[in-house]
Amino acid sequence: MILIHCPYCDETLPELEFAYAGEAHIARPLDPSGLSDEDWERYLFIRANPRGRHNERWRHVHGCGRFFNAVRDTVTDKFELTYKAGEPRK
Amino acid sequence: MVDAALRTAPVPADPAVYDGVTITLGTPLERRSLRARDAKALGKLLGRKLPEQIGRSSEDVLCLGPDEWLLRAPAGTAVPDGAGLPLALVDISERALTLVLEGPRAIDVLQAGCPRDLRKLTVGEGRRTVFEGVEIVLLRTGEDRFEVDVWRSFASWLHLALTTAASHLR
Ligand SMILES: [Zn+2]
């Protein structure tokens, strides 16, 4: 079973307590109604989907409840590191 | 709190006794979900020093998250409502019930369905976690004694899962 480090609990815990929540660092547009359809589509649907290093959101849903960010390798499924929400991309 | 005479529980009132563990329905509790950015203001209102590390408890308050605590006190305990303060104290007394596991094999029964390493959970600590996919709050109240808070609608299934695990002990 994959173990994930929660940066809020500061514990390394089984994956079963966590939920995946998509790519990280995607900021909601400040002026949504000013966006073109193409820009809105890009915000809603278009993701990097890299082969390799991926910054992504996770939630410690059956634990402290917090969202946080992680860097995971999409090929090996290995977690490189996790960090608190709001911290810059790593 | 509803009147005790009207109370029905979705699990048997009689203890389930196995070799090494007894599973019992806990007594009704006052439960409050406490949320606050400022732990000191909440602690001042409650007249308790709130634990700041996730999983630690002090008196009857358990820290569940960076801004979240769970208060569990005997039914009927008066708890202030914090009206007007930038805090949330939500009465969730009837949302959950407690199953008490006691005995030298209690940890083995819980470990059968909980992915955490429960040997690391020390006496006095508690965590929100899962048992076979059902969310629980697990508190270690003694070396061989655990309390499991579970939402009422999941309780009959959880009781079945725990007693099944207990009956397979060897
Ligand atoms: Zn956590």
Image (cartoon, coloured by chain):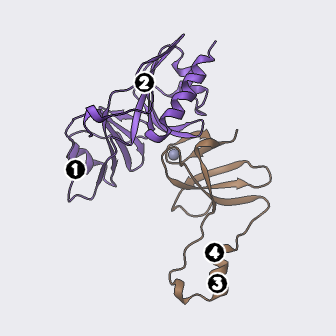
Q: Which residue is mark 2?
A: B123
Q: Residues within 10 Å of mark 3 (few under 14, many from 20)?
A: few
Q: Which amino acid, mark 2?
A: Val
Tag 3 subunit: A
Tag 4 subunit: A
Q: Position of residue B33 (x, y in %)?
A: 35, 46
* x 24%, y 39%: residue: B48
- Which residue ends up furthest to the front in the rendered image? B6
Q: Give the quadrant of residue B166.
A: top right
Question: Does mark 4 fall on the same chain as mark 3?
Answer: yes
Picture disc at residue A39: 3
What's the distance in space between the residues labelled 2 and 3, CA to CA?
Answer: 54 Å
The colour of chain A is brown
Q: CB of mark 1 within 8 Å of CB of mark 2?
A: no
Chain in purple in the render: B
Image depth: mark 2 or mark 4 in front = 4
Q: From this view, report whether residue B104 is shown above or below residue A87.
A: above
Q: Which residue is mark 4?
A: A44
